[in-house]
Amino acid sequence: QRGIRTLYQWDFRYLLPLLTWPLCGEWAAYRYLRDSVLAFRPQSDLTHLLQRTGFIDVAAEPLSGGITTLYEARKAP
């Protein structure tokens, strides 16, 4: 799982922008997308934030070998 995520992050940081830029010419858009995805909070930080802000039954399920995560939570009554 960790290996898939590491490969994906490398691809997302370096290979994807190099391959897509010549096709669309929008380097800034891909750089923004890359930077915002890489700056997303780690799973443990986000689940703690949800709990601190009043959500209950907080769950996080890594998908696609850890590339993405499905978050579920309910707002406390």
Image: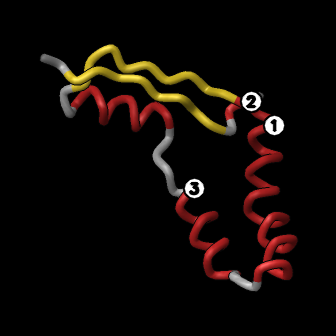
Q: Which residue is mark 3?
A: 37
Q: Which dot marks residue 4?
A: 1
The percent position of residue 50, horizontal first and vertical second, equals 30, 32
* Nearer to me, 23 or 3: 23
Q: Quadrant of residue 38?
A: bottom right
Q: Which dot marks residue 65?
A: 2
The percent position of residue 53, horizontal first and vertical second, equals 20, 33
- Disc 2: CA contacts within 10 A as few (<14), some (14-19) or many (>=20): some
State the CA–CA distance, disc 3 to disc 1: 16 Å
| Figure quadrant of the N terminus | top right
Q: Name the residue type under label 3.
A: Val
| Figure quadrant of the C terminus | top left
- If you read the primary sequence from the N terminus, does the residue marked by circle 3 or circle 2 appear first? 3
In what element is the residue under mark 2? helix
- Disc 1: CA contacts within 10 A as few (<14), some (14-19) or many (>=20): few
The percent position of residue 28, horizontal first and vertical second, equals 62, 81
Q: Name the residue type under label 2.
A: Gly
Residue 61 is left or right of residue 73, and the answer is right
Q: Are marks 1 and 2 in contact (CB under 8 Å)?
A: yes
- If you read the primary sequence from the N terminus, does the residue marked by circle 3 or circle 1 appear first? 1
Residue 72 is left or right of residue 31, and the answer is left
Q: Quadrant of residue 45?
A: top left
Q: Are marks 3 and 2 in contact (CB under 8 Å)?
A: no
Q: Name the residue type under label 1.
A: Ile
Residue 50 is left or right of residue 31, and the answer is left
Residue plotted at (36% across, 20% down): 58
Residue plotted at (75% across, 58% down): 12
